[in-house]
Image (cartoon, helix red, strand yellow):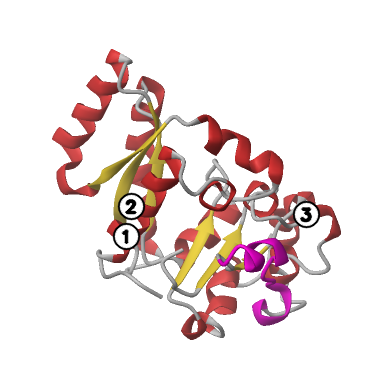
């Protein structure tokens, strides 16, 4: 939406980022699974969804589906298996301003591929107690990957999402985040928004489905804040 060239890599076998971009994950000719197994390159596998092009917000998608679940087993025993995505991205990274990698909510070989390929991590989180507990584990994982595998990796920032200012606990957790992580907490807060929740069922990102919704406006503001960080592919 800001006019930048973006590649979205879906590393989650659920394929939510793929479906939410208007791509039928069941009909993928090539996916990130094929890329990780080095059967095709990203230039061949990535597609720009027609519906997004028509909306003037086209970005390239390297999609995923349930087939990706088998990649971890197939990569066992392979040399430098945690760097398959990194090597594949090196061939196309100059074609994009940003490469966004959507990782699964678990530390496995897929997530490790994402962390080894990335320059930084953005953590979207709800301001709730268990999310706060899990954040400590995640930041420790990022540190371990930094020390052992990827010296370019860093925590870019924490993005507060699905935020309801009327819930006292969420306000308290938000304040704890800002007190502990300081400048690592993005200024923009993504509010809980019905229109954003509806968007995936229509196969569109919220900013395309309903650009004027308060959640969409907040995401555009977040994109601007991220761009001002100076981090790019």
Residue 50 at x, y percent in the picture: 71, 67
The image shows residue 202, relative to residue 40, as above or below, that is: above
Q: Can residue 57 be seen in the rendering of this structure?
A: yes
Labels 1 & 3 near each other (Cβ < 8 A): no
Q: What residue is at 64 percent from the left and 63 percent from the top?
A: 52
Residue 76 at x, y percent in the picture: 69, 60
User: Is residue 134 shown left or right of residue 199?
Assistant: left
Q: Can residue 154 be seen in the rendering of this structure?
A: no
Labels 1 & 2 near each other (Cβ < 8 A): yes
Which mark is nearer the camera, 2 or 3? 2
Q: Which residue is mark 1?
A: 224
Q: Main secondary structure of the magenta part?
A: helix
Q: Which mark sits nearer the N-terminus, 1 or 3?
A: 3
Residue 219 at x, y percent in the picture: 40, 48
The image shows residue 195, relative to residue 44, as above or below, that is: above
Q: Which residue is mark 2?
A: 221
160 inside magenta stretch? no
Q: Which residue is mark 3?
A: 25
**Circle 2 residues within 10 Å: few <14, some 14–19, many ≥20:** some
44 inside magenta stretch? yes
At mark 3, the secondary structure is helix
Q: Which residues are magenta?
A: 42-56
């Amino acid at each position: 939406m800001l006019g930048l060239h973006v590649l979205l890599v879906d590393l989650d076998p659920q394929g939510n980022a793929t479906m939410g971009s208007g791509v039928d994950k069941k009909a993928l000719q090539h996916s990130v699974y094929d890329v990780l197994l080095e059967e095709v390159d990203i230039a061949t596998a990535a597609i720009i969804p027609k519906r997004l092009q028509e909306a003037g917000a086209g970005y390239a998608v390297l999609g995923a589906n349930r087939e990706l679940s088998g990649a971890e087993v197939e990569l066992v025993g392979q040399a430098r298996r945690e760097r398959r995505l990194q090597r594949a991205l090196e061939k196309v990274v100059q074609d994009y301003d940003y490469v966004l990698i959507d990782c699964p909510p678990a530390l496995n070989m897929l997530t490790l591929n994402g962390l080894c390929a990335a320059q930084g991590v953005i953590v979207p989180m709800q301001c709730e107690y268990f999310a706060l507990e899990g954040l400590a584990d995640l930041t420790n994982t990022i540190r371990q990957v930094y020390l052992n595998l990827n010296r370019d990796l860093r925590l870019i920032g924490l993005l507060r999402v699905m935020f309801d200012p009327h819930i006292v606990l969420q306000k308290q957790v938000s304040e704890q985040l800002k007190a502990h992580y300081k400048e690592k907490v993005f200024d923009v807060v993504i509010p809980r928004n019905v229109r954003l929740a509806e968007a995936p069922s229509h196969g569109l990102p919220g900013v395309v489905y309903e650009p004027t919704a308060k959640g969409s406006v907040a995401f555009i503001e977040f994109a601007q804040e991220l761009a001002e960080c100076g981090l790019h592919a």
